[in-house]
Structure formats: C-alpha cells, structure tokens
Image (cartoon, rainbow, N blue to C red):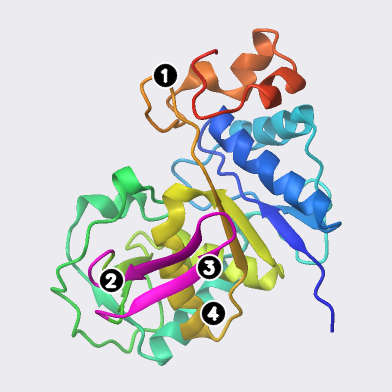
C-alpha cells in the first residue's frame, strides 16, 4: 500500500508569527509541494492562558499572504477534524489512560517552575530540566489526570536514535540528555509532547518539518510513539533563523513578525529571498 506524503504546519497562537516560524513553514510547504502531498494546518492552541483568538486569525492570514496553501485545517475542514488542539481533549485523554494502564507514567506532586510551560513546545535554551526522580516510584489508580502533574518514565541510559532528513543520524540518551517529562499538567492541560504525538498519528502525518531546537523533543516523542504503538513519521529539522546578535528568534521579536514586515512594505518575495543564517537586514 502506497502512503502518500502528508506534511503539517503547527503554529501556536501565542503571538504574531515571526520570520523564523515563516521560514520553517515555508520549508514544510515546499517539501510538500515537491512530494505532491497534502499539507495540514493544525492550530496548536493547547494552552488556554496563552493562546489568543486574534493571534490564531493573524497566523492564518499571514501564512496565506506569504503564499502558503494547505488542504486541511481549521478554516477549510478535512477528514481528521477538529484541527484545533483545544477541541481535541478526548483524544489526549484516551492516550493518557493507555499510558497509565501500561505503566509508562506516574503522578508527580513536585512544585517546579518549568511546569507552567509544559503545554508549549520546548527549546534548547529553555528546555525542561532533567527531573531528579522524586516521585518516580509513585503508583496510581487515578481515573482522571486532574490535580497532579503526570510524567513519562524514560528508560535511563537508552539511546533514542533517528535519521533526520537534513542533519543525518541523531542520538539522544534518556536520563542524560533529557529526563522524565511532563505529559499532563496539574491544571488539567495536556502537555505539548503528548498532544503532538497523538495529533500527528491521527492526522496521518508522514513527515514533520520543524526547527532544530526541537531535536530532543523528537526523542521524547519517539518514546511516546513506541509506548502507544504508533508509527514514527520522518523528521526534517530546519536551521534556526537568528537575529543580528545570533540569538534565536522568538515571539518577543515583534519587529521581525510577518505582520510588522507587511506593514513596513515588504513583499512575500522579498522576505523569502532574504532568508539566511540571520535576518539583520530587517
């Protein structure tokens, strides 16, 4: 059976899209075009405190202005709707129950500052610290994830290997490069890692294109895929766009958002042609 290429765009509506996001999404679009595949747009509005409807509307408008087209998404529908993570809670809850029944997760009552960002995609500079294992041996017969943080118990010392389509072979050692990670927050919000794994599997994504700051997240997600019996897609991790000082762009760089560049008169063609190792021209 032939598996047709299915790629995805997965923006989070927590701010205006900057040129770093745009280049990654443009790369995903170009790879999908080259494969004559289907492109899915998924609104990763998982965190109710940070996600805003005005940013969701802006990201759709800005991506279309840039020239990117998708065949499935919250604005066009498709066979794997809903395409908003805020509407997919039951999908994640089923996965949480499976992980609990199979002994892969445990409740954690530790108070840690990093848990507030567990619903967002981590990055190398602010990645989830390695958990010391305080609650690792706790057992639970819970019927709901509410009230505690739930962590995935990683196989310490095991090398998680995958072939990145841009960077080649990658290997991350569980327990050294990353530790037990959060899959569900105490405020009853599913974490980024579990949501992305379930969505990519259920939406039949065959290739994930994203920034190279998420390489360790790929290792975590492969562990979740294995635990849940899900297929692992191919991965292509893009180089990051940096500012004139060499710092990775973030949504705090408002001057480098697509919306601001549009307002300053840049055309989509000018933005695409100027992408390189930094964006100091802007």
* Crowd around label 1: few <14 · some 14–19 · many ≥20 (10 Å): few
At horizontal 31% and vertical 80% (from top left) the residue drawn is 158
Task: Tell me: 114 left or right of 91.
Answer: left
Q: According to the image, label 3 marks what residue?
A: 163
Q: Earlier in the sequence, mark 3 or mark 4?
A: 4
Q: Is residue 120 visible?
A: no
- The segment highlighted magenta reads 156-177
Please identify the quadrant where the N terminus is shown: bottom right
Which residue has dot 2 on it? 180
Mark 2 vs 1: CB contact within 8 A: no
**Residue pointed to by mark 1:** 244
Which secondary structure lies at badge 2? loop
Q: CA distance from mark 2 to mark 1?
A: 35 Å
The residues tagged by marks 3 and 4 sit, at their Cα atoms, a distance apart of 29 Å
- Mark 1 or 4: the one toward you: 1
Tag shown at residue 94: 4
Q: Secondary structure at mark 1?
A: loop
How far, Cα to Cα, is label 3 from label 2? 23 Å
Q: Are marks 1 and 4 in contact (CB under 8 Å)?
A: no
Q: CA distance from mark 1 to mark 3?
A: 31 Å
In reply to whether residue 37 is colored magenta, the answer given is no
Q: Choose the circle earlier in sequence order: 1 or 3.
A: 3
Establish if 41 lies above or below 92. above
Whether residue 162 appears in magenta in the rendering, the answer is yes
Taking depth in this image into account, of 91 and 275 the one nearest to the observer is 275
Residue 276, x across and y down, in percent: 56, 28
| Front of the two marks 3 and 2 | 3
Q: Nearer the viewer, mark 3 or mark 4?
A: 3
Distance in Å between CA atoms under marks 1 and 4: 45 Å
């Amino acid at each position: 059976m032939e598996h047709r290429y299915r790629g995805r765009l997965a923006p989070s509506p927590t701010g205006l899209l900057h040129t770093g996001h745009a280049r990654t999404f443009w790369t995903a679009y170009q790879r999908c075009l080259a494969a004559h595949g289907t492109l899915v747009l998924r609104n990763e509005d998982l965190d109710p405190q940070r996600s805003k409807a005005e940013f969701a509307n802006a990201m759709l408008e800005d991506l279309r202005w840039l020239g990117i087209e998708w065949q499935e998404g919250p604005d066009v529908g498709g066979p794997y709707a809903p395409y908003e993570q805020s509407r997919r809670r039951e999908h994640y809850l089923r996965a949480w129950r499976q992980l609990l029944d199979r002994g892969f997760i445990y409740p954690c009552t530790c108070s840690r500052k990093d848990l507030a960002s567990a619903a967002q995609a981590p990055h190398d500079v602010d990645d989830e610290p390695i958990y010391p294992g305080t609650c690792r041996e706790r057992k639970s017969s819970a019927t709901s994830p509410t009230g505690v943080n739930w962590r995935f118990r990683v196989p310490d010392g095991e090398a998680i290997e995958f072939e990145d389509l841009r960077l080649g072979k990658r290997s991350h050692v569980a327990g050294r490069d990353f530790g037990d990670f959060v899959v569900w927050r105490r405020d009853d919000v599913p974490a980024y890692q579990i949501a992305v794994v379930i969505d990519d599997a259920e939406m039949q994504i065959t290739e994930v294109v994203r920034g190279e700051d998420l390489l360790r997240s790929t290792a975590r997600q492969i562990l979740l895929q294995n635990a849940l019996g899900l297929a692992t897609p191919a991965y292509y991790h893009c180089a990051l766009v940096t500012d004139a000082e060499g710092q990775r762009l973030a949504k705090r760089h408002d001057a480098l958002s697509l919306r601001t560049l549009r307002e300053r008169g840049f055309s989509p063609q000018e933005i695409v042609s100027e992408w390189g190792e930094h964006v100091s021209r802007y």
